[in-house]
Image: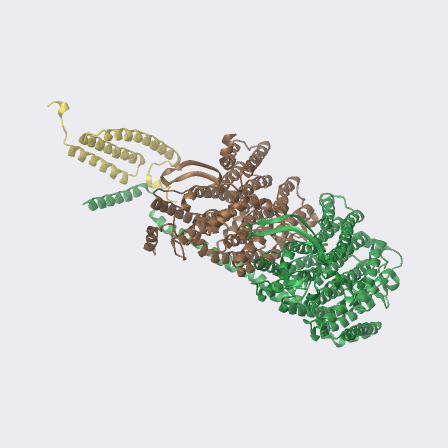
């Protein structure tokens, strides 16, 4: 038990993978074996969720910055160690991940019927990758997990996806890879700078905080390094105009893939900004604040507009993700407690409500094998329970007060208003257009007479499907009414984050500057 | 002069080694029969072995001898695997001519 | 205890909602009759009415300055230290919103009871009543909220219920569209509201009403100046942004377009939401923040002008409508314009007064119209009615009272409030003769179109085919329920008076419409005194007119109303004459009938362009530019590979040869380098 307590993060991270390896041993030639595998995987993810609750209870909001830390030597030559730890920001993202995984697995029971072992193995492996990225305190270790989660996703889209799955998987892979390679270069450069300034190589996050890199201006070393990181994260978020992989990947991915992609993988971008890009390069953040906020405002309105005209439900939801994640970036770059809190909250909201939307689209797709909005109409009449759930999720997506979406959007816009009223006003247009595309979608799918003969005999949600949705519905209201429950644990971490990220060059003037870096870059320029 | 005291000039041995090596190399590049190519590789490896021994003697350092044992082991493994592959190849394509089995080209 | 006022309807909603969702909605679920869900819903709202009444009496016993009851339910959002954001889910009852809670729960209860009869043929009454309860919950949150975000919670909540109830008969695409339109247009207003809140927060650091008020007012209600460090421009900006929200919710130009379409919902909904309560929330907000609005003459001017023009404009449209509910809808828009005219000239009390009387008589008119529609088997066209006086005597009688009230004839309630508004528009320091004239002309037009409606519906000869007893047609109507709109093939209908559950509430409302004006008789107004703590006398713009002028204006407006009524009577006595008049002004009539083509204008200037732009952005930017760049990277890589692959012959021996050359070259370089 002692061992468990002191290694709880490692347990949570690697448990799904280990469990999945045993799952590979289950033969899937007959029906009972297939069911056994499904339940095996489900139980594994539920256990992971249970373990992650342990993290919730062990975490002290007012304690040290990083808690439940673990440290083991890994690649001493590069100063890289297996270093885990978490704070209030990663806490909820970890729980979001472990919370969504069982839901996704339960939702896949009937959706996926071929190559089961590979599918469920990859789902759990993906969970390990995501959890690892959220708890890594070593930049290199983070990078490894970042890539680890890319691979299962690539296969999930590429093998179990729709018609153009190969194209979508490839696009997703290449897009992400381009960003992450630049990040790797930036990581090595930081490690090298650590050696120049401190004498040893290191990729530990806390060590890298101490490295001094000249900032200011768009071409300063700090800005270039920041862009190296920011590109990777902006692609993942995805920020306009780097978003075009998202609609393709979402549309082609199986339902579970879409939910995980929207629910957790996109959050990796926001988390990366929070954990790495901002605290490491405060000067650069000050430089890039307004440009990024402009991009975020464009993303919000642009995503909403383009979502409006999509003929495919899943693509519509995908573009709505672009819009919603634009809010996240807007809040982050507003650089005040209100905006950042709202932004983290919006990440959780988006995981819950967009995840729910993808699940709903998946459920109706399973019945009709089409996602064209024009094929539907009047579904409320034949699937009343589905209609009720869809309505609630829609409301959460349009940020109705009382649901989770409102808290996030309100705080983000308020925070952004404090930084730049003009951009906040433009972004607030998303409030209008968000309602336009969601309600129009709802009307075309659910309202009106049943025009299509094939829709007349659709079965309403099964007990299993309702069980999938209920936890999400519960979260929608809980997070809308009692956000303090979530804020409490985040607050000190956000404060620390802000102190660290707003400490610009002036404040840290005492640190001796290293001329070698400047020389390095001036040679290039 | 006893047999044990018979000395060969080192340059002679090295010249011999390089001759064998280049014969092997030439064979490797020119011949089209995989079996012959494998033999040529053996030839080159053994030329290297001999060179190692020679230098070991010259410098009075056992590192060279050690390398030889290492190479012999690897060479044995290599020819075992190589011959196995040749047999497998011959079974499938009925040929051991390299011009006919350029599978690396798409 | 205060929190229970909104909680009762919420509980009602949960009971009815869960019952519906778990037992009625699922395929094969048991359908419920309207009675039980209706009783649950009515009881829950009636409970909050009793509670509101008790709290009102409690307030009444307090000294005037201390008339506040507060309750913090829980802490909603809490971020950061002292400079952060703190928001309680708190309610505060004072003399202003106690009136609103009374009206909402009181009129709400009547409309709930009425709905039991009205929705008796409906297929899903459980759903209807749960929505209705949810609406009451949200509306009560709106008026009881102690801060702007809580008000906003209710504000959006009522918008949601409005959306759900307008599109209640969702199988009709047009009705579903009307619901969506209402929500989206309201969202445009909410956009302004949100920005207004942000500006308030960054300026004053709080969103709580009392905190804001203390920033403006010091001591016992004495007016102070604008808080130090805040520019008048900021105040104006705040007020205008908030007013954008009011334009949406309270249907003012240019965001009124959703309200007439909202008549697609069941008639009790139109009465409750789109006449009595929800649409007046904009007036509530302005009255609530009167201490702020009073400091921005610009904003007040905008409000008064928009209000007066809306009143006039909507009245012109109402003249040419034939749908009984559409006429009432435009008349609601027009009356809301009056209320904003009052607020805009600084006469918040008059605005609130009109909210109350309007809630009575407009609910009465809508429910009466509902009774007519019910009795006429879903007929809504007034040109196909006539002569209902003898067939629906109760409805006729109560409708007549409502008609007289809205026309502004003494001593009915509408007279007092409308007259107060007109007087203030004329005499207040923010007022002008122009605003008064616009209001007075509107009053005449109101009298005209309401008389037209009344005459065509109840008087004259019947213009429909009728069958005697409750024959086949009524049975058919029953079995189809209200959503089918099926009429018997021969067009003959059995006209019948509505059941007591419907006429009962009508009679109560008729009494209220008749005497409701007594709370605000000029110069001895109980209302003014009661609202004093919230809307101080000083906020009411000082009168600078001679008192006799008041009587003159009163006479003018009554005379105008009488003339309007008389002209309409004269005109519609002989329908041929009316038709001839219509012919003579055919062009104008067409414009009015088509509502000045505003919907078409919005469609063409805003909706279509944005839609086309989105389409273009997607196809010509996302797909054509960004994706092409991304795929371009792939193409370049592919091309490079294609070119380079010719080197790869596949022959190991060639590779080995190249390797050899490389080796020789590098060894040569090393040796050369060493030398």
Q: Which chain's colour is green?
A: C
Left or right: residue B95 compared with residue C62: left
Asked if residue A402 is positioned above or below residue C340 in the image, the reply reads: above
| Colour in which the image shows chain B | yellow
User: Residue C334 in the image: x percent, y percent?
Assistant: 72, 67
User: Residue C659 in the image: x percent, y percent?
Assistant: 28, 43
Residue C374, quarter of picture: bottom right
Asked if residue A37 is positioned above or below residue A382 in the image, the reply reads: above
Left or right: residue C400 compared with residue B69: right
- Is residue A438 visible in the rendered image? The answer is yes
User: Residue A431 in the image: x percent, y percent?
Assistant: 60, 57
Asked if residue C631 is positioned above or below residue C444 in the image, the reply reads: above
In depth, the one of C568 and C468 nearer the eye is C568
Q: Which chain's colour is brown?
A: A
User: Residue C668 in the image: x percent, y percent?
Assistant: 22, 45
Q: Residue furthest front?
A: C219
């Amino acid at each position: 038990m002692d061992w468990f307590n002191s290694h709880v993060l490692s347990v949570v991270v690697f448990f799904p993978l280990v469990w999945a390896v045993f799952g590979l041993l289950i033969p899937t030639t007959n029906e009972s074996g297939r069911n056994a595998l499904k339940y095996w995987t489900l139980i594994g993810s539920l256990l992971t969720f249970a373990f992650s609750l342990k993290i919730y209870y062990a975490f002290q909001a007012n304690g040290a910055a990083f808690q439940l830390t673990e440290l083991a030597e890994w690649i001493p030559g590069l100063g890289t160690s297996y270093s885990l730890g978490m704070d209030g920001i990663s806490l909820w993202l970890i729980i979001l991940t472990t919370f969504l995984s069982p839901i996704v697995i339960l939702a896949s029971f009937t959706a996926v019927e071929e190559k089961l072992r590979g599918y469920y193995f990859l789902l759990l492996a993906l969970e390990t990758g995501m959890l690892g990225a959220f708890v890594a305190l070593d930049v290199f270790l983070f990078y490894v997990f970042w890539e680890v989660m890319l691979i299962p996703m690539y296969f999930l889209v590429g093998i179990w996806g729709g018609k153009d799955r190969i194209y979508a998987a490839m696009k997703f892979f290449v897009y992400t890879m381009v960003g992450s390679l630049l990040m790797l270069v930036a990581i090595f450069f930081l490690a090298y700078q650590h050696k120049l300034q401190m004498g040893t190589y290191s990729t530990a996050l806390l060590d890298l905080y101490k490295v001094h890199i000249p900032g200011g201006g768009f071409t300063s070393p700090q800005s270039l390094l920041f862009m190296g990181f920011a590109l990777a994260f902006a692609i993942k978020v995805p920020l306009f105009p780097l978003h075009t992989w998202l609609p393709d990947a979402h549309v082609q991915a199986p339902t579970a893939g879409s939910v995980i992609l929207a629910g957790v993988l996109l959050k990796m971008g926001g988390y990366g900004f929070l954990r790495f890009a901002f605290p490491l390069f405060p000067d650069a953040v000050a430089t890039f604040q307004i440009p990024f906020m402009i991009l975020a405002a464009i993303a919000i309105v642009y995503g909403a507009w383009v979502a409006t005209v999509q003929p495919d439900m899943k693509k519509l939801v995908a573009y709505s993700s672009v819009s919603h994640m634009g809010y996240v970036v807007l809040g982050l770059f507003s650089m005040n407690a209100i905006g950042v809190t709202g932004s983290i909250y919006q990440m959780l909201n988006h995981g819950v409500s967009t995840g729910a939307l993808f699940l709903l689209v998946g459920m109706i797709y399973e019945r009709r094998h089409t996602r064209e909005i024009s094929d539907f109409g009047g579904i409320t009449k034949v699937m009343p329970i589905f209609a009720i759930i869809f309505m609630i999720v829609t409301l959460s997506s349009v940020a109705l007060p009382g649901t989770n979406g409102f808290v996030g959007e309100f705080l983000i816009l308020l925070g952004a208003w404090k930084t730049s009223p003009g951009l906040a006003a433009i972004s607030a247009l998303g409030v209008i257009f968000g309602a336009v595309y969601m309600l129009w979608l709802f009307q075309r799918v659910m309202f009106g007479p049943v025009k299509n003969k094939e829709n007349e005999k659709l079965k309403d949600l099964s007990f299993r499907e309702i069980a999938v949705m209920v936890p999400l519905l519960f979260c929608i209201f809980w997070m809308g009414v009692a956000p303090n429950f979530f804020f409490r644990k985040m607050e000190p971490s956000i404060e620390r984050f802000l102190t660290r990220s707003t400490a610009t060059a002036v404040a840290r003037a005492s640190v001796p500057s290293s001329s070698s870096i400047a020389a390095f870059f001036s040679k290039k320029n | 002069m006893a047999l044990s005291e018979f000395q060969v000039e080192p340059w002679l041995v090295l010249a011999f080694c390089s001759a064998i090596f280049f014969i092997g190399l030439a064979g490797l590049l020119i011949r089209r029969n995989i079996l012959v190519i494998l033999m040529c590789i053996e030839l080159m490896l053994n030329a290297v072995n001999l060179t190692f021994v020679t230098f070991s003697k010259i410098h009075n350092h056992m590192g060279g001898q050690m390398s030889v044992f290492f190479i012999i082991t690897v060479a044995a493994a290599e020819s075992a695997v190589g011959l196995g592959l040749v047999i497998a190849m011959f079974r499938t394509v009925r040929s051991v001519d390299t011009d006919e089995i350029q599978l690396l080209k798409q | 205890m205060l929190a229970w006022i909104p909680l009762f309807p919420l509980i009602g909603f949960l009971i009815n909602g869960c019952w519906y969702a778990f037992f009625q909605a699922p395929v094969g679920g048991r359908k419920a009759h309207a009675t039980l869900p209706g009783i649950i819903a009515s009881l829950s709202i009636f409970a909050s009415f009793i509670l509101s009444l008790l709290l009102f009496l409690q307030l009444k016993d307090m000294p005037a300055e201390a008339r506040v009851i507060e309750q913090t339910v829980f802490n909603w959002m809490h971020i950061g230290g002292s400079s952060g954001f703190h928001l309680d889910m708190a309610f505060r009852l004072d003399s202003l919103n106690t009136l609103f809670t009374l009206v909402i729960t009181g009129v709400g209860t009547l409309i709930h009871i009425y709905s039991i009869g009205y929705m008796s043929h409906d297929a899903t009454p459980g759903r209807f009543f749960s929505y209705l309860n949810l609406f009451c919950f949200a509306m009560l949150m709106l008026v009881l909220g102690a801060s702007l975000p809580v008000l906003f919670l209710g504000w959006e909540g009522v918008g949601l219920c409005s959306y759900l109830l307008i599109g209640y008969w969702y199988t009709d695409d047009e009705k579903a569209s009307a619901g969506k339109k209402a929500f989206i247009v309201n969202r445009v207003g909410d956009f302004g509201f949100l920005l207004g809140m942000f500006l308030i927060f960054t300026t004053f650091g709080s969103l709580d009403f009392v905190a804001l008020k203390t920033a403006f007012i010091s001591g016992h209600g004495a007016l102070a100046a604008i808080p130090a460090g805040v520019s008048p421009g900021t105040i104006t900006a705040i007020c205008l942004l908030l007013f954008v929200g009011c334009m949406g919710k309270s249907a003012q130009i240019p965001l009124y377009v959703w309200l007439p379409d909202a008549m697609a919902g069941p008639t009790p909904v139109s009465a409750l939401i789109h006449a009595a309560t929800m649409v007046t929330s904009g007036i509530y907000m302005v009255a609530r923040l009167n201490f702020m609005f009073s400091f921005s003459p610009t904003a007040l001017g905008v409000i008064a002008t928009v209000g007066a023009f809306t009143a006039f404009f909507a009245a012109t449209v109402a003249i040419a409508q034939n749908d009984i509910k559409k006429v009432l809808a435009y008349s609601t828009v027009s009356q809301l314009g009056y209320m904003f005219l009052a607020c805009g000239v600084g006469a918040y009390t008059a605005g609130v007064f009109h909210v109350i009387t309007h809630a009575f008589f407009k609910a009465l008119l809508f429910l009466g119209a509902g009774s007519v529609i019910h009795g006429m088997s879903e007929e809504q066209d007034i040109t196909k009615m006539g002569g209902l006086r003898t067939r629906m005597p109760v409805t006729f009688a109560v409708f007549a009272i409502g008609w007289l009230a809205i026309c502004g004839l003494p001593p009915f309630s509408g007279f007092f409030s409308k007259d107060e508004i007109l007087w203030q528009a004329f005499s207040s320091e923010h007022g002008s003769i122009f605003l008064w004239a616009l209001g007075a002309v509107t009053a005449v037009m109101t009298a005209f179109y309401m008389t037209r409606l009344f005459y065509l519906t109840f008087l004259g000869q019947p213009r429909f085919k009728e069958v005697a007893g409750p024959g086949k047609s009524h049975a058919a109507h029953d079995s189809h329920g209200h959503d089918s709109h099926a009429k018997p093939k021969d067009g003959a209908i059995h006209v019948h008076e509505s059941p007591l559950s419907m006429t009962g509430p009508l009679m109560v409302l008729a009494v209220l419409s008749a005497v409701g004006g007594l709370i605000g008789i000029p110069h001895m107004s109980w209302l003014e005194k009661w609202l004093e703590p919230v809307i101080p006398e000083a906020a009411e713009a000082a009168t600078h007119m001679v008192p006799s002028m008041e009587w003159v204006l009163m006479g003018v407006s009554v005379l105008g109303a009488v003339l309007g009524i008389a002209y309409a009577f004269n005109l519609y006595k002989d329908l041929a004459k009316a038709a001839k008049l219509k012919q003579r002004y055919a062009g104008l009539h067409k414009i009015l009938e088509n509502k000045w083509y505003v919907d078409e204008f919005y469609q063409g200037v805003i909706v279509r362009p944005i839609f086309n732009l989105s389409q273009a952005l997607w196809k010509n930017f996302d797909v054509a530019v960004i994706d092409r760049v991304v795929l371009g990277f792939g193409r370049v890589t592919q091309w490079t590979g294609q070119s380079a692959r010719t080197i790869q012959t596949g022959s190991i021996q060639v590779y080995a040869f190249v390797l050899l050359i490389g080796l020789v070259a590098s060894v040569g370089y090393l040796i050369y380098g060493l030398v």
